[in-house]
Amino acid sequence: MAKPTDSWSQFYRLAVGLLLIYGLTIIWPYISSVVIMLVFAFLFTTVLLPSVDLLERKLGKRVFGVLIITVAVTGGIGLFIGSFISQFAGQAKTFIEQVSKYNFEEIIKNLVASLFAKMPAFITAILPQGDELTEWLTGLASNVTTYFQNLISVAGDLVGAIGSAFFTGLMVLIFTIIVMQNYHNFKRSMVHFIPNKYFEVGLRLTFNIERQVSNYLRGQFMAAASVAVMSIIGLLILNALGANLTLVIFIGIIAGLANLIPLVGPFVGMVPAILIAIMNNLGNEAAIAHKLIVIPSPFYILDIILMFIIVQQLDNNIVTPKLVGESVGLHPLMVMIALLIGGTLLGPLGMLLAVPTAGIIKVIAQEISFVSRNAHLL
Amino acid sequence: MKSALWENIFKGWKKEESATVLTLKQVPIFEDFSNREFREIEKLIHQRTYKPKEFIFKRLAPGEGMYIILSGGVEIYAEDANGSRNVFAVLDEGDFFGEMSLLDAEPRSASAISVDHSELLGFFRSDLMSILDRNPDLGNRILLNLAKVVVERLRHTNNLLTEAQKQASDG
């Protein structure tokens, strides 16, 4: 039978725990952005840590390693964003000029009519009928055109949004530099607070979580890099076949980055490629009449989709199993549930963080189960 | 005036060695390390305080690393099936124990309990991994020294076994 003091102690702990949770819900709106910045700083540190450790080993001083990595990463990101903005602005300008040159509705109507003429009857029967489809497509096209035209007029709003994103990025960068420099001291200070009884268990838990997250993130980033390279090669091959695609390197990088979000990401990568293929080939008869073997593939859309499917298959079956392997060891159903929960709670950001978070929860659950089974040994 | 200036400039050169470094210098695993290397190890190890009769670890618990006694005392023992305590060693300042756990996660072969107010330094497998990542030369020297300690123990055990076999055949 439990002693009364034990019951009081349990009640006291429960009350303190509930009060802490209540307090956290009140202050969460004020601290959430800083917490998310810190989470990102720790995630970036986890990815960059081996490089910083390696440079510390070679140069003898950690601060030099942190400095070199910071300059390389910020320089790379700055170069990417700068050249992307300049090339994207040029692309948008060309597109608006092209759209005003042609009768867009006419092109879409002709395209739908020629497609329907080439398709077998059983397919045309299940598809929405000609006018309906034309209306939808012209509506979509005029929306895209309006969007690009509005883009220039809403430049003022964009400057504000970019300023805010720049501030967030700067804060994450500063946090990342601090965490990279003091990572090992932070870790030691954190485990210092674990009571003696649970110290070795706590140390193992910290080590396992760190290894899990670091393996997963490093594997994911390497897989993303390989998807980017394979997509760029694929797009260059399509260009050699006459697809007339521009911003190839950026599309590749976007496809690679989108790949960081499991299941959904691969499809996100296709969208900019298809949009650019349509923009660049407006009025190009050869591109509109293009066929993938025998199937009509206007604007090389099917070719692009097929190319991304091949890249995804190579990534899913060869690259990711080699790089990421069983690093998280979650059942595919659990991955899907984690993605749905993450997406519902935090949107795309939640989907990005869902799988490593589920992996951390799994490690904690395994350790709790171990501790409860071996409580007599502690 | 002149000497005060020079003393000020070189004040960092004559750093007093901390009690931690002085204790680490007595441990064969850190044999022949430079002061700079000791400072690097000092940044990684964990200082823990134990009350009298508080367990450091229990027998059969998975081992994570070794402990070095900074002050106080530790008793290493195992209980047999009848519950009677078999004390293997009572260790004090400068002694170390649990070093085999740096190499594997096998269960502890004995329990360790603090006999006094004790300050211990913990050096764990994850710390060793970290050193191997960041400074492989230092990590390899720790592993080599650890191997020397293990080999020395094995040689001692072999001698005891040979003596026991000899006594059995004589008897």
Image (cartoon, coloured by chain):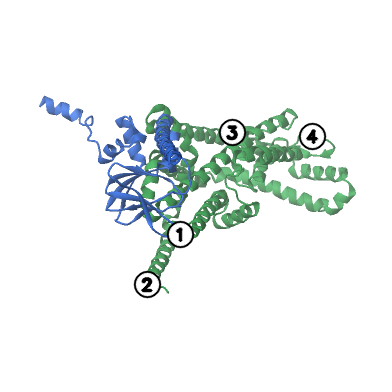
Chain colours: A green, B blue
Residues A103 and B93: in front is: B93
Label 4: state its secondary structure.
helix
Q: Which residue is mark 4?
A: A285
User: Can residue A147 be seen from the camera position used here?
Assistant: yes
Asked whether the beta carbons under mark 2 and mark 3 sit within 8 Å of each other, the answer is: no
Q: Residues within 10 Å of mark 2 (few under 14, many from 20)?
A: few
Distance in Å between CA atoms under marks 1 and 4: 75 Å
Is tag 1's residue or tag 4's residue first in the polypeptide sequence? 4
Q: Residues within 10 Å of mark 3 (few under 14, many from 20)?
A: some
Identified by mark 4, the residue type is: Glu
Q: Would residue B159 be found to the left or right of residue A357 on screen?
A: left
Identified by mark 1, the residue type is: Ala
Mark linked to residue A8? 2
Distance in Å between CA atoms under marks 2 and 3: 67 Å
Q: Residues within 10 Å of mark 4 (few under 14, many from 20)?
A: few
Residues B135 and A43: in front is: B135
The image shows residue B127 at horizontal and vertical percentages of: 41, 41
Mark 2 or mark 3, whichever is nearer to me = 2
Q: Residues within 10 Å of mark 1 (few under 14, many from 20)?
A: few
Mark 1 or mark 3, whichever is nearer to me = 1
Distance in Å between CA atoms under marks 1 and 3: 62 Å
Q: Which residue is mark 1?
A: A375
Figure quadrant of the C terminus of chain B: top left
Figure quadrant of the N terminus of chain B: top left
Residues A232 and B93: in front is: B93
Q: Do tags 1 and 3 sit on the same chain?
A: yes
Identified by mark 2, the residue type is: Trp
Instruction: Pinpoint the chain carrying mark 4.
Output: A
Instruction: Pinpoint the chain carrying mark 1.
Output: A
